[in-house]
Image (cartoon, rainbow, N blue to C red):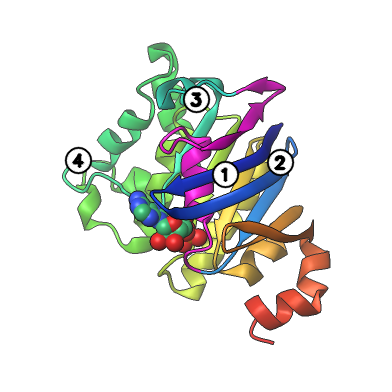
Amino acid sequence: MLNVENLSVNYGHIEALKNVSVNVKKGQICSIIGANGAGKSTLLKTISGLVKPVSGTIYFEGKPLPKKAHKIVAEGIVHVPEGRKTFSGLTIEDNLLVGGTLTDKTRLTANLEKQYQLFPILKERKNQFAGTLSGGEQQMLAVARGLMSEPKIILLDEPSMGLAPLIVNQIYNLIGQIRESGITVLLIEQNAKKALSICDYAYVLENGKIKLSGTGKELLASDEVRKAYLGG
Ligand SMILES: Nc1ncnc2c1ncn2[C@@H]1O[C@H](COP(=O)(O)OP(=O)(O)O)[C@@H](O)[C@H]1O
Ligand SMILES: [Mg+2]
């Protein structure tokens, strides 16, 4: 569904991605794991058109992706950035409506209702400012805001970052539900254990290069992954 081919990205003289190829299959959860600075966020930013590659091509459903970020969203790709980036001075409902800016107005209300069903806590607090939410709730809001654009694929950048284990489990349950609803997921994580446990297929990114790939199960069992990412 999403094919990244030989992608290279530089920031000045820093080579953030070197010849990276990744294949995300429709209906699956594909994960990219890697340490801080490996290039994970750069990969997502390049897919969503926020960063321009030096070389390489990204295909979505067989066609090269458009260059402009809003056109990429219109193709059905939505990016939930690292650190949530919710609008703290807007209400929860207004945050969600921002996510629906590009969708048909007639479906906005139905989409809002869908998010409120998936995330009851957001419904309870829909008129509060987003800044009053906890970290986990803000992560849920960021995901729900992404879903408002009716994506075919959702790109999640470290959704578990900074959250307590119980909340991380809630977020991961939601990621499972998103896949069940037919939306493909590209999940970026430093939290290798959680990501590998839920994903269908995964890649290990190290210093801007793909080091290994395999099913979540294979990578969880790999000595190399265990030593470097799972604490032995
Ligand atoms: N805007 C930027 N300008 C310069 N260097 C950057 C920028 N963003 C990221 N980098 C560098 O690119 C590399 C990859 O960063 P990033 O993609 O954020 O990694 P990750 O998300 O895996 O932590 C790092 O060396 C980082 O310092
Ligand atoms: Mg990052």
User: SS class of the residue under badge 3?
Assistant: helix
- How many neighbours does mark 1 have within 10 angstroms: few (below 14), some (14-19), or many (20 or more)? many
| Residue at the image position 34 percent from the left and 35 percent from the top | 96
Question: Residue 24 shows which numbered tag?
Answer: 2
Please provide the residue range marked out in magenta. Answer: 36-64
Question: Residue 72 shows which numbered tag?
Answer: 3
State yes or no: discs 3 and 4 in contact (Cβ < 8 Å): no
- Front-most of residues 148 and 119: 148
How far apart marks 4 and 1 lie (CA) works out to 37 Å
Q: Quadrant of the C terminus?
A: bottom right
Percent from the top left, x then y, of residue 189? Answer: 55, 61
Percent from the top left, x then y, of residue 111? Answer: 45, 27
Disc 3 marks which amino acid?
Ile
| Residue at the image position 51 percent from the left and 66 percent from the top | 168
State yes or no: discs 3 and 2 in contact (Cβ < 8 Å): no
List the residue tagged with mark 1: 8
- Front-most of residues 28 and 157: 157
List the residue tagged with mark 4: 90
Tell me, yes or no, whether the highlighted magenta stretch contains residue 167.
no
State yes or no: discs 1 and 2 in contact (Cβ < 8 Å): no
User: SS class of the residue under badge 1?
Assistant: strand
- Please determine whether, in this image, residue 197 is positioned above or below residue 92: below
- How many neighbours does mark 3 have within 10 angstroms: few (below 14), some (14-19), or many (20 or more)? some
Disc 1 marks which amino acid?
Ser
* Left or right relative to 4: residue 140: left
Tell me, yes or no, whether the highlighted magenta stretch contains residue 52.
yes
* Labels 4, 1: front one: 1
Residue 152: quarter of image: top right
| Residue at the image position 79 percent from the left and 80 percent from the top | 223
